[in-house]
Image (cartoon, coloured by chain):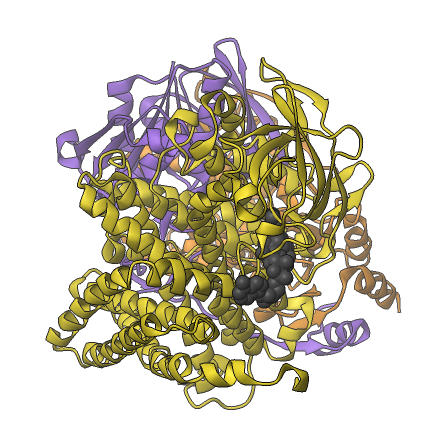
Chain colours: A purple, B yellow, C orange
Amino acid sequence: MKVLVAVKRVLDYNVKARVKADKSGIELANVKMSMNPFDEIAVEEALRIKEAGNAEEVIAVSIGPSQSQETIRTALAMGADRGILIETEEELQPLVIAKLLKHVVEKESPGLVIVGKQAIDDDSNQTGQMLSAMTGWAQATFASKVEFEGDALKVTREVDSGLESIKVAMPAVITTDLRLNEPRYAKLPNIMKAKKKPLETIPVADTGVTTTTGLSVVEVNEPEQRQAGVIVSDVSELVDKLKNEAKVI
Amino acid sequence: MSYTAPVRDIEFMLNKVVGLDEVAALPGFEEATPDLVAAILEESGKFTAEVLAPLNRVGDEQGSSWSEDGVTTPEGWKDAYQQFCENGWGALSFEPEYGGQGLPMCVSAAVQEMWHSSNMSFGLCPLLTQGAVDALHHHASDEMKERYVAKMVEGTWTGTMNLTEPQAGTDLASIRTRAEPDGDHYRISGQKIYITYGEHDLSENIIHLVLARLPDAPEGVKGISLFVVPKFLVNDDGSLGERNDVKCVSIEHKLGIHASPTCVMSYGDNDGAIGYLVGQENHGLMYMFTMMNQARHAVGVEGYAIAAGAYQKALAYAKDRKQGKTLLGTSEDDQGIINHPDVRRLLMTMRSGVDAMRGLALECAASFDKAAKHPDADKRDYYQRRGELLTPMVKGWSTEFGVELCSMGVQVHGGMGFVEETGAAQYYRDARITTIYEGTTAIQANDLIGRKTARDGGQGMKELTTEIRATVGELEKSNRAELQVMAKRLGDAVEALEDTTDWLLKQDNAALPAAGSVEYVMMSGRTVGGWMMARTALAATASSEDPKYSDAQITLARFFAEHELPKVGSGKQIVTEGGESTISIDVAML
Amino acid sequence: MSTLILAEHEGGALRPATLNVVAAATQIGNDVTLLVAGSGSDAVAQAASSLAGVTKVLHADDAAYENELAENLADLVMTIANDYEHILFAATASGKNVMPRVAAMLDVPGISDITEVQSADTFVRPIYAGNAMATVKSSDARKVITVRTTSFEAGAETGGSASVETLAATAASEKVSFIGQELSQSDRPELTSARVVVSGGRGMQDGENFKMLDEIAEKLNAAVGASRAAVDAGFVPNEYQVGQTGKVVAPDLYIAVGISGAIQHLAGMKDSKVIAAINKDEEAPIFQVADYGLVADLFDALPELSKGLDG
Ligand SMILES: Cc1cc2nc3c(=O)[nH]c(=O)nc-3n(C[C@H](O)[C@H](O)[C@H](O)COP(=O)(O)OP(=O)(O)OC[C@H]3O[C@@H](n4cnc5c(N)ncnc54)[C@H](O)[C@@H]3O)c2cc1C
């Protein structure tokens, strides 16, 4: 079985996003970019599935500009076997990403697709579910544990009231939550090997997928800033302020 | 303590200034392409920031501790060391035949900077192992290499360097540890002091490289031999055998690097520790010298690496801390002390200083890379000379300046710098050792004026200043005012350095040059640092990728030229005129 | 045209989140239809019919809907989707699970987590963990949306008198089945709707110490939350997590204890009316958003606070 993982190049987790002066979006020129943290978890899970003998090949797919190759190389350095880049300079919405992933799924016929539950840039939390709906494959979102049970999977999901588990037939689409695993660091020899692993680039135009949608960004603004308040000197002052000034207790 | 590896600055220096492409074009280094090196630096940055940096503080507070059963490293160190090895970081620069990656020294130095910035006490363990592996690689028999090296490259075994004894520090000629022949091996007995990671709980075995004397050895430097003394003897099948007769009897309480155990090692309390001769008898010190450049370079990297850590800490504090109205703040909210011009000066000195030292160290490493792999023999000689010439500057200048910058880091914090809470003080304390071990600054200075300058009649220095002058010419051609300023300052500096070199070469009273030798290391280090910064500025002018970044590089280079290079001129005065007063006083009056 | 909302319910009652979604729908302006899908859910349908602003309730009752499986709910929505211009879900684990399927099947982009309705086709939503707010406009005939519940004041539970119509159930998916759940047992109010939230971070050091927060929560009738660091460290289960990828809360009072205040955490709580923070590190970013900050060791401060609340 092949496992397909989708990896997105996003503004690094530790870098504070700044709105561009013309409000057209976020400043991304010359800032540190990294793999979406949820996608690292996806890669890690795919590798563990392979290492446990439940898959033969892990393919990392990214959709984005040519620099997304670095993101794929990161996945390859972690241990993925090969990469596919669907190259586009446009910023695409989850609907389009899901269609492009479907294109790859049809070509590669994996038994499992693992994607992050959301990308920390647009925070949409849609791609996995959309891909599942488009392919008709079972959906297991927000996974915190994935277990093989014959030709089905038992997936433990993080939901608002705790954990729930579902059984899904394969092929399936899984989206990862934070507690699924702790991604490994790439080992130095693997970073070196990653350079030689195959990485195929497909221009987005060759997929036949329309990349425009009816949804457009009008503008992007800074959020309203909260002002820092006062530092109180002790607990009794805190209680007093909450009672008598803020009147919230 | 938080640390963010300055990946971008390192990459800029490597790619655009030092010229990684030239190194990667050499046979054997083809793999070291910029994209691969970028991936390595990125991952190393992540590992050091997430795994090593968080242990820096615990390391300082807990320190390593000694008991009869051995030395225990601080909480979390064992796991981190295991991860470090599993991820292959220890094997970066070693030859592929031993399981290393065979990457150039300039890449390995770039990575090692991150170890020491994030956690120098930790970084020392692989640093020492690397020294021991180098010694074995160059001088041990194939059989001996086979037995020890692969495990050391892996990190499952670590290595130590056992030179120092109570009476033999700088002067290794007075080493007394004895080695008695006993069949196919030797029995070692004696005491070694200050042995870094001489005992610890991070690895299965510890391979000690020990300098000792045979019973019939000639006096002095020509009578010292090098031995391998494993903590656990290694069986023919590679498994671990008996515990050898070597023991850590205590560890030192120190100013800094608390987590790095500095051990008093006792050899042969019972029947004598079993040791195996490396190479030939009585060649020990010579062997040490062949790997000295590497080891000294590594300590020089520590010097600026720790200043880089101190800089990050100081920068963050200066943005946050508010004291009074600043002259440079642009608004009510923008009143961090960073906007006081003097705090800026401190930070600019730290930042430009680290950049300059990094430039020097990477340039030196790239020279050794070329010396090792260049197809043209003349070029190999040329670069070997260059690497050797720059090494005492890397070790001497970068550690002294590194300490100074860490002190500035404390200063930026004000009182908070002096109290331990912020961690600024730890950088300062940890940095302090770097000017002492692996040859004190004075020893680097002796090396620079003696072996590296006088011995070749100043040829290496001449080659260097000629190249610097070429850069001055390029700066003069630029139409940017900042580069004109650099041209002037760098031109003045190189002239002062040349004058001083000429003066040194002419002296016959050895004491006068010796009195000014440390200053000579400082002035040459500064000049080469200024050269690297000027080349950075030239590269930045040529790069249109990110104008803001380029402008900042140019400003940093200009700052360095205006604040550090003038000291080269006064250095000339100190060296050429200040010797007499240094040495002439009646010691009884001191 | 009108707006369809997929109601959320559990234990025979609507989840409060649905009232917030109704409020958002009211701002859009069209008639509001509530779809109640469940098993044995008559009471829920009845309750739904009395919500202010709801004009119609569609009720599908079938075992397929018992456990909120996304496949089954999305298929059901699709049987009527073409009658609506807007299809709204709460931005809860359940709503996020279903919404994108519906959008994909309608071949329109989904619009996640809206915090503001500017007009029937223009919405504001946070991106980059709330470090930026994007105004987005849809020209599609159907707009499929999740609503950030804390951004819309809940609508009234009574005052409406909608008709309840039965909707034919769709077949349950054969590819997925529900196995079970591990829900936290707590008498505390639910995190996202509590008036007061007391949250702990890595500074709590272990799960046992969260009992100190429980004690305070008890006295304030508050819910207990946690930062990601505390959840990752295993101090408390995942459902406690407040933040960009956890729950978004906006109580009247949020008390952050031993939480440094990473951007990702602030994203989940910075709309709280009043924020109080206790942290021993005076440089912790949490103090930059707190109305009241106390620099203190939480192990000293919490027992005192608990005592102070008795007085
Ligand atoms: C923390 C720590 C770790 C160490 N790790 C190791 C290790 O792993 N292995 C090891 O073998 N050793 C190690 N050392 C020893 C270290 O290398 C020596 O301390 C160092 O070489 C200086 O020797 P010394 O202490 O005897 O000082 P001395 O040699 O007594 O020097 C005292 C002063 O005299 C000056 N001086 C001495 N000779 C000359 C000269 N010829 N010209 C000018 N000035 C001179 C020195 O510069 C210095 O200022 C370590 C030391 C420390 C403190």
Q: For this rendering, which residue is in front, B569 or B319?
A: B569
Decide if residue B123 is in sight here. yes
The quadrant in which the C terminus of chain B is found is bottom right
Q: Which quadrant of the figure has residue B533? A: bottom left
Is residue A138 left or right of B473 when viewed as pictured?
right
The quadrant in which the N terminus of chain B is found is bottom right
Q: For this rendering, which residue is in front, B89 or B457?
A: B457
Is residue B304 left or right of B523 when viewed as pictured?
right
Residue C281 x/y as whole percent: 67, 66
Is residue B79 left or right of B155 when viewed as pictured?
right
Residue B581 x/y as whole percent: 50, 86
Q: Most extreme residue toward the top, as rendered?
A: A150
Is residue B463 left or right of C248 when viewed as pictured?
left
Exactly how many numbered labels are in the figure?
Answer: 0
Residue at the image point whose x is 44% and y is 37% from the top: A40
Decide if residue C89 is in sight here. no
Residue C29 x/y as whole percent: 38, 56
Q: In which quarter of the image is ligand 1?
A: bottom right
Residue at the image point whose x is 78% and y is 74% from the top: A234
B77 to C286, vertically: above or below: above
B379 to B402, vertically: above or below: above
Q: For this rendering, which residue is in front, B51 or B526?
A: B526
Residue C301 x/y as whole percent: 80, 65
Q: For this rendering, which residue is in front, B20 or C309?
A: B20
